[in-house]
Image: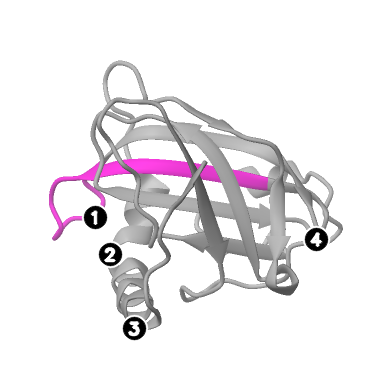
C-alpha cells in the first residue's frame, strides 16, 4: 500500500482556510452524477493515532474524474453505532461526539483501482472530540468541482459511506 503525502504545516493551514470557506459545502451537498459512481472499499480497520485526534484509513478506490477528496470519520461518545450521525451533514448539529476529517489528501483519478492510506485529523477548523475504539461513520468522497466560485456545483464521482471498525 502506498502512503499518501502529508502536506507541510503552512500549506495545510492555507488549505484548511480555503476548505472551510469553499469546499466543505461542496462535499456535503455534492450531486450524484448520471451513470456509475467510482469504486471504493475499506481495507481492514481504522487505526487511531495521536491520542485519538488522528486516524489512518486504508482504502481501495477508483475514479475517472475528480479534483477534490474529502475523508471524514464521526463517532458517538461511547463508540457505538448511532444512526443519527449518518444524517448530521457537516457536523453542525454535534450529534457526533468526535469528528475528524481531511480535505488535504489527494486522490488519483485515472480510472484504475488504487490502494492508499489517508489521514484524518483535527487540523481543519470545526473538528472536535477524540476517536476511541468502537465504530465510526466513514465518508470517502471524490468530487469534481468545475466552478471554484460555486462550491455547490460539484459532481460526486466516488462515494463510500459506511460504518467502520476503529481500533487502537
Image quarter of residue 95:
bottom right
Circle 1/circle 4 CB separation < 8 Å: no
Mark 4, residue position: 132
User: Nearer the N terminus, badge 2 or badge 3?
Assistant: 3
**Residue 147 within the magenta-colored segment of the rendering:** yes
Query: Magenta residues, as a range?
Result: 137-154
Q: Which of 64 and 112 lies nearest the eye of the viewer?
A: 112
**Residue 1 within the magenta-colored segment of the rendering:** no
* Residue 147 visible in the snapshot: yes
Q: Which of 6 and 74 lies nearest the eye of the viewer?
A: 6
Mark 1, residue position: 151
Relative vertical location of residue 137 with respect to residue 60 in this rendering, above or below: below
User: Nearer the N terminus, badge 3 or badge 4?
Assistant: 3
Disc 2/disc 4 C-alpha distance (Å)? 30 Å
Q: Which mark is residue 22?
A: 2
User: Nearer the N terminus, badge 2 or badge 4?
Assistant: 2
Nearest to viewer (mark 2 / mark 3): 3
Does residue 156 appear to the left or right of 124 in the view shown? left
Residue at horizontal 59 percent and vertical 48 percent from the top: 57
Label 4 crowding class (10 Å Cα cut-off): few <14, some 14-19, many 20+?
many
Where's residue 108, x and y in %? 31, 41
Q: Which of 114 and 145 lies nearest the eye of the viewer?
A: 114
Tag 4, which secondary structure?
loop
User: Nearer the N terminus, badge 1 or badge 3?
Assistant: 3
Q: Which mark is residue 10?
A: 3
Q: Which of 14 and 26 lies nearest the eye of the viewer?
A: 14
Residue at horizontal 24 percent and vertical 47 percent from the top: 67
Residue at horizontal 33 percent and vertical 77 percent from the top: 17
Does residue 156 appear to the left or right of 98 in the view shown? left
Amino acid at each position: 500500500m502506498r502512503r499518501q503525502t502529508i502536506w507541510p504545516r503552512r500549506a495545510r493551514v492555507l488549505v484548511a482556510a480555503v476548505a472551510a470557506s469553499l469546499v466543505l459545502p461542496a462535499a456535503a451537498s455534492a450531486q450524484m452524477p448520471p451513470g456509475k459512481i467510482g469504486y471504493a472499499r475499506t481495507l481492514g480497520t481504522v487505526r487511531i493515532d495521536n491520542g485519538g485526534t488522528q486516524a489512518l484509513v486504508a482504502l481501495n478506490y477508483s475514479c475517472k474524474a475528480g479534483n477534490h477528496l474529502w475523508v471524514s470519520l464521526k463517532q458517538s461518545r461511547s463508540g457505538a453505532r448511532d444512526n443519527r450521525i449518518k444524517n448530521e451533514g457537516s457536523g453542525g448539529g454535534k450529534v457526533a461526539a468526535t469528528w475528524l476529517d481531511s480535505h488535504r489528501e489527494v486522490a488519483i483519478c485515472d480510472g484504475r483501482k488504487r490502494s492508499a492510506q489517508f489521514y484524518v485529523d483535527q487540523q481543519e477548523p470545526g473538528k472536535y472530540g477524540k476517536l476511541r475504539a468502537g465504530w465510526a461513520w466513514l465518508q470517502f468522497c471524490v468530487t469534481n468541482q468545475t466552478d471554484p466560485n460555486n462550491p455547490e456545483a460539484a459532481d460526486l464521482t466516488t462515494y463510500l459511506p459506511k460504518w467502520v471498525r476503529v481500533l487502537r
